[in-house]
Image (spheres, helix red, strand yellow):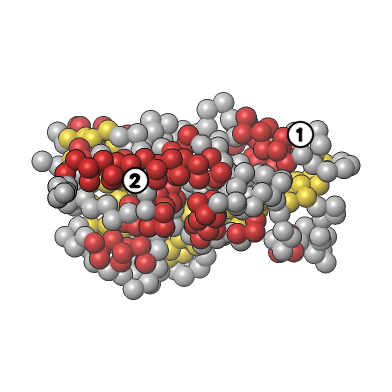
Amino acid sequence: MQTVLASTSLSFDLSVFELFLPLSVGTKVRLVKNVLEVVTEQCVRDVTLLNTVPSAISALLDNNTYLEKIRVINLAGEALHSELINKIFEQYTAISVCNLYGPSEDTTYSTGIRFNNAVQSTPSIGRVISNSIALILNEDGQLLPYGSVGELYLGGDGVSRGYRHQSELTAAKFVSNPYSTVGQGVQAARLYRTGDLVKYLPCGNLAFLGRIDDQVKIRGFRIELGEIEFELSQLAEIDSCLVIAKQVGEDNRLIAYLKGHDGDINIGEVKKALRLALPEYMVPSFFVEVEEWPLTPNGKIDKKQLLEIEGVGFNEEYVAPQSQTELALVDICSELLELEQSKISIKANFFELGGHSLLIMKFVRKIEEVLGITISMNAFFDVQTLQELASLCEIIAVSQSINEVDDVAEYEEFEF
């Protein structure tokens, strides 16, 4: 019996694939709130098909999570690298790994490629699926030859009608297909501009090369940097701002550069305002105040020079670790988030420093290795600071040591 894991929110188009497609053909569906629940929930270990983002499967592999019945792993939402594919095949042999690509505007997938063994180079996003078309066009809407880089346009049965109540945006992103021919279907007359840069490889597959605008991926979520900048510009103390995504290890970190009207900017208040207006993953990890914008010779803001300026996290006041437990947690945080220890205050919040749910499993495993205690992943959501987490770890350590003494007292025999 095939079993599909359904972990995607109903607000995302992938949920249709996970729920209704399996049920329509009589396949069993396992419902979970989060794909990472497969770590602790034994009832979901029987899944045969898993849909998730590369960063999530990477976290599961790092946690040595083994799904003995898995047969297909579908990966989408983030760039997939050969290292991860090969890591999957080191743990699982008789499976298929699919690299799938498709924006929500062309539900659910647009292109795909299947791998049955290890790969040597960066994986492509494959070829366009049935009942869909993919065109690579230049800025003038002209078809480009094989090997040339251009914007990917998608058409076919999956293309949506447009954005609800956003006629201008719909007109900009959904355009007529000047290359449509009889027999391609009604939807082939319309194309969706993805904003993604691609090119055809000699084998006929599509290679994904990045974005042509300021959209970036944060933990699998596609976001517009301009949306964050808009919310910042609404704050009275902000004169001008710029948000940049910086690659740190395998993650993108958002850095907000702020120029105030006069005086210092209250970073704490800025953070609170953003949290009320934006999802958590869109709130920058660091903020940098600038007196004047560095400019390039042609008068544009010099982003490279901005990245050299040191910023501040969400906690303006640095408090050094006092206990061995606090020091250990700061050290783990430094390793996982790739931050200098001197920049991590024990009053800081793990998530505000750039941490996220995928890193919690690694943090839990590190705590077990370094401190010798077992802590729940949920504990990270119950505490506000590293200092509070350290206190919780110390309480757990005492509790575990008492249990060990009780075990000895109950089961060991002593001679007098």
| CA distance for labels 1 and 2 | 51 Å
In the picture, the quarter occupied by the N terminus is: top left
Q: Name the residue under label 2.
A: 401
User: Which of the 4 quarters of the picture holds residue 304?
Assistant: bottom right
Residue tagged 1: 235
* Residue 283 image label: none
- Pick the residue in front: 195 or 79: 79
Q: Is residue 350 in view?
A: yes
Contact check, label 1 and label 2, Cβ < 8 Å: no
Which residue sits furthest right?
262
| Residue lying at 60% horizontally and 59% vertically, measured from the top left | 341
Q: If you read the primary sequence from the N terminus, does the residue marked by circle 1 or circle 2 appear first?
A: 1
Q: Looking at the image, is 343 positioned above or below residue 402?
A: below
Neighbor class of circle 1 (other Cα within 10 Å; few <14, some 14-19, many 20+) is some
Of residues 151 and 244, which is closer to you in this image?
Answer: 244
Please provide percent x and percent y for residue 328: 50, 56
* Rendered residue at 25%/66% (across/down): 90
Kind of residue indicated by mark 2: Ser
| Amino acid type, mark 1 | Leu
Q: What element carries label 1?
A: loop
**Image location of residue 337, percent across then percent down:** 53, 56
Would you say 160 lies left or right of 210 here? left
Q: In this view, does 406 lie to the left or right of 11?
A: left
Residue 158 in sight in this render: no
Q: Which residue is drawn at the image coordinates 19% and 32% (left, top)?
A: 24
Give the foreground label among 1 and 2: 2
Q: Around disc 2, counting alpha carbons within 10 Å, would you say few (fewer than 14), some (14 to 19), or many (20 or more)?
A: few
Q: Estimate the x, y position of residue 281 in percent, counting from the top left.
A: 54, 42
Residue sitting nearer the eye, 267 or 109: 267
The residue at 23%/35% (across/down) is 30
- Residue 25, how many percent across, how many down? 16, 35
Identify the secondary structure beneath mark 2: helix
